[in-house]
Image: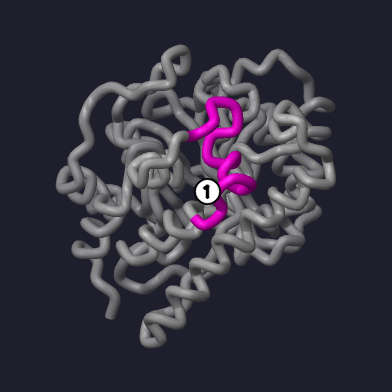
């Protein structure tokens, strides 16, 4: 999937970040996915905020959406599947309305978010990779949801926040069955390793030559590690476009469900310039990165 010559393709920021900024109270178990049922218009509005800020790719509210999670709130498998696939429809609705309002701009794209197994556990394990389950459990979790999102009409799949080598191996196999092009991004604990301690080069190399994956990178990782990680990824998978959409660098406490620290839009944009120099061709943000951050990136890299 070609990138824009002379500048990166801009991604959105944290969907939950914008939803909370708009006054939504998120379900501790389902996070923003709960709003697929209770407040779909709020999700459309959050997508639109990122599009208005300059994002060229928006990501669906399916990161924490699964049969397991919805089942814990009493929903049937059929209703869960409807909501998971519907997350792409909501993003598409926002994208199409933006396109109608801005016919002179290049078409925007929708990425279907494929979050890790740990996101459903709601214990912070997507930041450690310590799931305590085998490959069969991961396959049973990912396969039906991935199939739903592959068939939902998204432009691409965003397989994101992968913290472990085992989960990356499972998804490398499953993505071989998908028709929708995908990016893969990892959650990292430092400048060289996934959250579970696997060298980033080893994890990235799983996707070298993968026919369904066009980009490999990192997300939900502290920005200070991004350049070093991009260097390692570029060396391991030179056939894939590097991408980066880190968090704000603030610290999340899973026990209290709170963040601590500060985020600055100008410093984020300056750091993004360094990531582009390091090879990143898709740049955006994750947790605690909002529309104002993306607008700073758009100011740095205006559309022609």
Q: Secondary structure at mark 1?
A: strand
| Snapshot quadrant of residue 179 | bottom right
Front-lying residue, 90 or 228: 90
Left or right: 144 in relation to 5: right
Determine if the magenta segment contains residue 53: no
Front-lying residue, 265 or 277: 265
In the image, residue 54 sits, relative to residue 198, either above or below, namely below
In the image, residue 261 sits, relative to residue 103, either above or below, namely above
Instruction: Please provide percent x and percent y for residue 156.
Output: 61, 61
Q: For the view shown, which residue lies furthest in the front direction? A: 38
Front-lying residue, 195 or 106: 106
Instruction: Please provide percent x and percent y for residue 14.
Output: 41, 44
Look at the image and tell me whether residue 67 can be seen: yes
Q: For the view shown, which residue lies furthest in the left direction? A: 266
10 Å crowding of disc 1: few (<14), some (14-19), many (20+): many
Which residue position holds label 1?
216
Q: Which residues are magenta?
A: 26-41
Quadrant of the frame with the N terminus: bottom right
Instruction: Please provide percent x and percent y for residue 224.
Output: 28, 33
At a point 51% along the width and 27% down the height, the residue shown is 194
At a point 24% along the width and 24% down the height, the residue shown is 261
Instruction: Please provide percent x and percent y for residue 63.
Output: 59, 42
């Amino acid at each position: 999937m070609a990138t824009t010559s002379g500048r990166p393709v801009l991604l959105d920021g944290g969907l939950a970040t914008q939803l909370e900024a708009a006054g939504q109270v998120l379900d501790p178990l389902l996070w923003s996915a709960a709003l697929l049922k209770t407040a779909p218009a709020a999700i459309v509005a959050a997508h639109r905020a990122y599009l208005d800020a300059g994002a060229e790719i928006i990501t669906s509210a399916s990161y924490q959406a699964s049969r397991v999670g919805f089942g814990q709130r009493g929903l049937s498998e059929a209703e869960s599947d409807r909501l998971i696939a519907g997350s792409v429809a909501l993003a598409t609705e926002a994208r199409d309305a933006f396109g109608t309002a801005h016919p002179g701009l290049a078409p925007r794209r929708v990425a279907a978010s494929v979050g890790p197994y740990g996101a459903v556990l709601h214990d912070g394990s997507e930041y450690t990779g310590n799931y305590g389950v085998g490959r069969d459990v991961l396959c049973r979790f990912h396969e039906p949801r991935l199939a739903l999102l592959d068939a939902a009409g998204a432009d691409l799949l965003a397989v994101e926040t992968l913290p472990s080598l085992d989960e990356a191996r499972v998804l490398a196999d499953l993505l071989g069955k998908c028709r929708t092009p995908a990016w893969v991004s990892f959650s990292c604990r430092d400048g060289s390793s996934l959250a579970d301690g696997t060298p980033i080069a080893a994890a990235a190399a799983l996707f070298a030559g993968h026919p369904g994956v066009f980009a490999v990178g990192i997300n939900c990782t502290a920005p200070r590690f991004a350049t070093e990680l991009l260097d390692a990824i570029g060396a391991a998978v030179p056939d894939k476009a590097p991408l980066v959409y880190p968090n704000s660098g603030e610290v999340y406490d899973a026990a209290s469900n709170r963040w601590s620290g500060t985020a600055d839009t100008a410093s984020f944009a300056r750091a993004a310039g360094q990531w582009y120099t390091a090879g990143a061709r898709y740049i955006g943000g994750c947790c605690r990165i909002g529309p104002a951050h993306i607008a700073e990136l758009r100011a740095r890299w205006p559309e022609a």
